[in-house]
Image: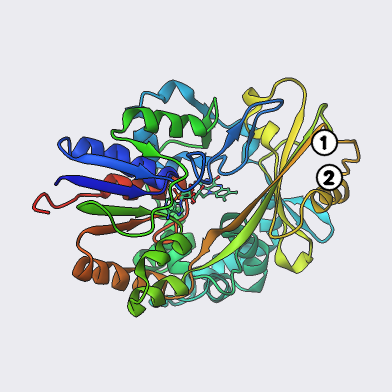
């Protein structure tokens, strides 16, 4: 192995650079980033108030590779757990803010009845899965907003196997989700949410420092280079490398994406009495926003003083829609001290039914026709930062190349 070229300076590319630096000590490694900064979706700002523009929370029990990397990079001391209050989650339903726990009560019959419902082996939409197992109420009240919260996506379009593989696995192994949850071994897994005290961009900075080889900003890579190329790009960026290859192009065209608008709003004082993670808005409510995160309540250690920090997520719109929602839903009518709007174009991948089968076929196609290329990124097997890190950690390049 002589030269490894990485395209993309987000978490996928930088994690790949770090792991490959360790796995291939003799190789020359070069990373190209088309923009003027590293981090991609990850961006932490700390003046005048602290905010994450992109990812902000990680569930400890679902992030083994990310936690290992954080420890390996010596950032363990930066780990910041969420408050106990962050366990409280709300939904904006029937024109009021309601606790998720209270909304479960009317569902108890369908939760119990789920034991008797026969399993189905194939892939299906999240909505179809939820209705089949639990009925309409649970599908609309819980599965629809969770899909909006994680994928900004439509539960009637997205694949349950690709978006929530653990649910299908529970159905396969136990014949029922509720039975699987009750039988779950109480393994000692880390609990709660976490972030990094100085912001998630700290991870980016440390990866830059600990990985090897030059990084070139403002450099758009347009073709395969070196002895091995790693494309650590969103689907739209990776697709450009496969011009004329209809099988590969068909795969990329099958992975949809949606825009996300992130509005960070700060009020200099406490403006809302409730604590919690935030709330989501089911589609049936026909509101303009997807949900709101109560940042200052989840990680108060990142507050500068008494401020209230919120992040409003929308598919389209901006400041006006965000402030309107805070006023209508939370009764917050004070003037904000700061508002920042960031639009992520096509940033959230949408996995349709059959996505995982298509990924397998695409990976087999790559292995056969492009043995000198690896594709990693959030459009393959999960959009989380942990999934991006895990792919980088698994990269192994054949030494014979
Ligand atoms: C608003 C938001 C909130 C999120 N919240 C969470 C969360 O709380 N928890 C969680 O786990 N995940 C979250 N995610 C998902 C997660 O942040 C992303 O999936 C992940 O950061 C994607 O990283 P990436 O490196 O694959 O892609 P990106 O971050 O998109 O980076 C790709 C990079 O490649 C560059 N590039 C593109 N084309 C080329 C080219 N040809 N040559 C060179 N460079 C190129 C781009 O400029 C970019 O910098 C969130 C995402 C968003 C948008």
Dot 1 surroundings within 10 Å: few (below 14), some, or many (20 or more)?
A: few
Secondary element at tag 1:
loop
Residue at image coords 33%, 76%: 245
CA gap, disc 2 to disc 1? 7 Å
Residue 88 rendering spot, x and y as whole percentages: 66, 42
Residue 128: quarter of image: bottom right
| Residue 187 can be seen, yes or no | no
Look at the picture and state if 320 lies above or below 193.
Answer: below
Residue 393 rendering spot, x and y as whole percentages: 29, 44
Residue 260 rendering spot, x and y as whole percentages: 64, 56
Look at the picture and state if 385 lies above or below 362.
Answer: above
Residue situated in front as seen by the camera: 195 or 369: 369
Residue 170: quarter of image: bottom left
Residue at image coords 71%, 25%: 48
The residue at the far left in this view is 400
- Say left or right for 118 vs 19: right
- Residue highlighted by disc 1: 272
Residue 223: quarter of image: bottom left
Residue situated in front as seen by the camera: 158 or 47: 47
Dot 2 surroundings within 10 Å: few (below 14), some, or many (20 or more)?
A: some
| Badge number at residue 5 | none
| Badge number at residue 330 | 2
| Residue 400 can be seen, yes or no | yes
Residue at image coords 47%, 69%: 255
Question: CB of residue at label 2: within 8 Å of ligand 1?
Answer: no
- Say left or right for 347 vs 173: right
Residue at image coords 55%, 58%: 348
Residue 336 rendering spot, x and y as whole percentages: 84, 35
- Say left or right for 144 vs 329: left
Viewport quadrant of the C terminus: bottom left
């Amino acid at each position: 192995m002589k030269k490894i070229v990485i395209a993309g300076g987000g978490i996928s590319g930088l994690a790949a650079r770090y792991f490959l630096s360790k796995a291939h000590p003799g190789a020359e490694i070069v990373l190209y980033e088309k923009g003027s900064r590293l981090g991609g979706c990850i961006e932490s700002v700390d003046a005048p108030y602290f905010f994450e523009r992109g990812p902000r929370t990680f569930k400890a029990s679902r992030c083994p590779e990310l936690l290992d990397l954080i420890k390996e990079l010596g950032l363990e001391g930066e780990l910041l757990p969420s408050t106990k209050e962050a366990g409280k989650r709300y939904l904006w339903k029937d024109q009021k803010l309601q606790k998720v726990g209270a909304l479960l009560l009317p569902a108890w019959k369908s939760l119990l009845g789920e034991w008797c419902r026969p399993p189905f082996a194939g892939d299906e939409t999240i909505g179809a899965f939820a209705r089949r197992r639990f009925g309409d109420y649970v599908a609309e009240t819980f599965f629809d907003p969770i899909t909006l919260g994680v994928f900004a996506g439509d539960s009637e379009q997205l694949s349950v196997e690709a978006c929530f593989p653990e649910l299908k696995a529970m159905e396969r192994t136990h014949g029922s989700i509720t039975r699987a949850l009750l039988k779950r071994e109480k393994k000692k897994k880390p609990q709660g949410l976490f972030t990094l005290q100085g912001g998630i961009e700290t991870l980016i900075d440390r990866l830059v420092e600990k990985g090897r080889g030059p990084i070139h900003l403002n450099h758009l890579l347009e073709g395969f280079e070196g002895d091995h190329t790693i494309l650590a790009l969103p689907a739209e960026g990776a697709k450009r490398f496969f011009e004329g290859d209809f099988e590969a192009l068909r795969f990329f065209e099958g992975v949809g994406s949606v825009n996300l608008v992130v509005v960070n709003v700060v009020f200099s004082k406490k403006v809302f009495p409730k604590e919690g993670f935030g709330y989501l808005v089911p589609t049936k409510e026909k509101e303009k926003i997807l949900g709101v995160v109560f940042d200052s309540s989840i990680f108060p250690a990142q507050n500068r003083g008494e401020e209230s920090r919120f992040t409003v997520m929308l598919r389209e719109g901006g400041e006006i829609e965000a402030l309107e929602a805070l006023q209508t839903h939370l009764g917050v009518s004070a003037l904000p001290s700061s508002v920042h709007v960031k639009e992520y174009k096509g940033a959230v991948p949408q996995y349709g039914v059959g996505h995982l089968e298509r990924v397998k076929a695409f990976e087999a196609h790559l292995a056969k026709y492009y043995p000198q290329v690896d594709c990693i990124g959030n459009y393959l097997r999960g959009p989380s930062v942990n999934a991006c890190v895990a792919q980088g950690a698994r990269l192994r390049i054949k030494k014979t190349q």
